[in-house]
Structure formats: structure tokens, C-alpha cells
Image: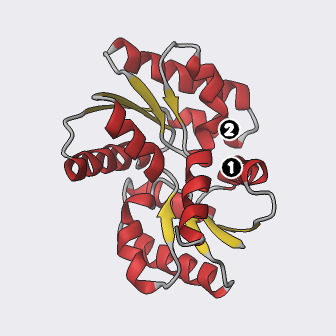
Amino acid sequence: MKIGIIHATSNAVPPLNDAFKSLAPNVTIFNFVDEYLQYYANQIKGIDDKVHRDFVNMAITAQEAKVDAIIVACTVLTPIVDIVKPFITVPIIAVDQPMLESAVNNYRKIGVVATNAPSGPATKAQLEKIAGKFGKEIEVDTEIDIQAMTELKAGNEEEHNRLNALAAEKLKQRGCEVIILAQITQASAESKTKELGLPVLTSPKEAVKEVLRIAVGD
């Protein structure tokens, strides 16, 4: 089996690849990375026609590698996965979808920590969309700390993790029942954030389980 993973930062590659090594070591992984895409989305603080075009092109490139399914590992792009689906023929899922569905189904006040500007609002919108689909009433609060991503890119994982935990603490003080670390790059902060005593959700392992289920046609 071959799985393609679309990334907008190289820092997202190790967490998801490690999850595959743990859960499905025989799967062949192809990583498709375009770091300018995330940089551009941060500059315009959102998604425009160029982001849509670049995303479609990456998905088509992954499909041409004859993958059995695709994971979109960038939370800037996950809200528009459904828009891309008509352009390709292989299954494609958002890395955070299983995690977000779990949050909506189990908690009412959800705290979201993000480390790049578009991901906070995008994750909030996705949670609200899922809640509407499932008929759930939720409240979503967000904290964004772009310095944490800067630290991670500079190799300062410990400081990245500390800043994530600080952002999560603010959400806890505002009454959140669960913390979502919105981006796959934040997975390393899970242990530090759990010291707050709240449930902490991250996306890699749940996404791997889901894409394997879809790829084998279950």
C-alpha cells in the first residue's frame, strides 16, 4: 500500500511518518511538501484562488504517484479538502478530521491552540461545521502563538512545547474542557500540555487509522 501525504511545512513530516512506522510499518509513504504555500497563506491571512490551485496541483501530483489514498496534513488546507475531491479519483482525508469529530462528540467547550495564523480560525470553523452535522452544541475558544512555530522551525522544540502549554493554560482558565493542538507540527507538545490536567487531542495516529480503513475499502 502507498499513501501520499500533503504538507505545507517540513516540520509536519516526522510526526505523521512516525505514526505510520508505529501503526503500519509496511506502508510506503510519499511526502509532498510545499513550504511556500503555508508562508503565502500566512501573508494573506487566509486562503485565496492561488492556494486552491496549488492544493489541487499537489493532490494531482500525489495521485500520479499511484498512491492508494492521500492525507492532507496542513490545517490551512484541511477546510477545503472537499473542494479538491472532484479533481482526483483516490480517497483523500484531512489529517485533523478524526480528531475534530472526537472533540465534538465528547466535549462542549473546546479549546484550540494553533501556531500559525490561519489555522486557528480554520479549525474553529471546521469544529462548528462538524457540530452542525452531528447536531451538537459546542463553544470554541482559540489561542494562536506564531512564535511557537518560529521556535520549532529553529529547532527549539522545548520552547515550542512550553509556548503551546502556556496557550493551553489560558484556554483552561477560560473554562475549556479539552485542548486541541490544531496542527500536526504541535504533536511534540502533547506531553507538556497534558500537565495542565485536561484531555489533549492531536491528529497523527487517528488520521493514520482512518486513512488505512478507507484505503482498504472498509
Of the residues shown, which amino acid type is indicated by label 1? Asn
Q: Is there any visible trace of residue 4 in the rendered image?
A: yes
* Quadrant housing the N terminus: bottom right
Q: Residue furthest front?
A: 218
Cα separation, mark 2 vs mark 1, equals: 8 Å
Q: Are marks 2 and 1 in contact (CB under 8 Å)?
A: yes
**Residue 31, position as x, y percentages in the image:** 70, 66
Q: Say what secondary structure mark 1 lies in.
A: helix
**Residue 135, position as x, y percentages in the image:** 18, 45
Of the residues shown, which amino acid type is indicated by label 2? Leu
> Circle 1 sits on which residue?
11
Q: Residue at x 36, y 12 (%)?
A: 173
Label 2 vs 1, first from the N-terminus: 1
The 10 Å Cα crowd at callout 1, few under 14, some 14 to 19, many 20 or more, is some
Mark identifier at residue 89? none
Task: Decide: is 72 above or below 136.
Answer: below
Left or right of 30 in this view: 40: left
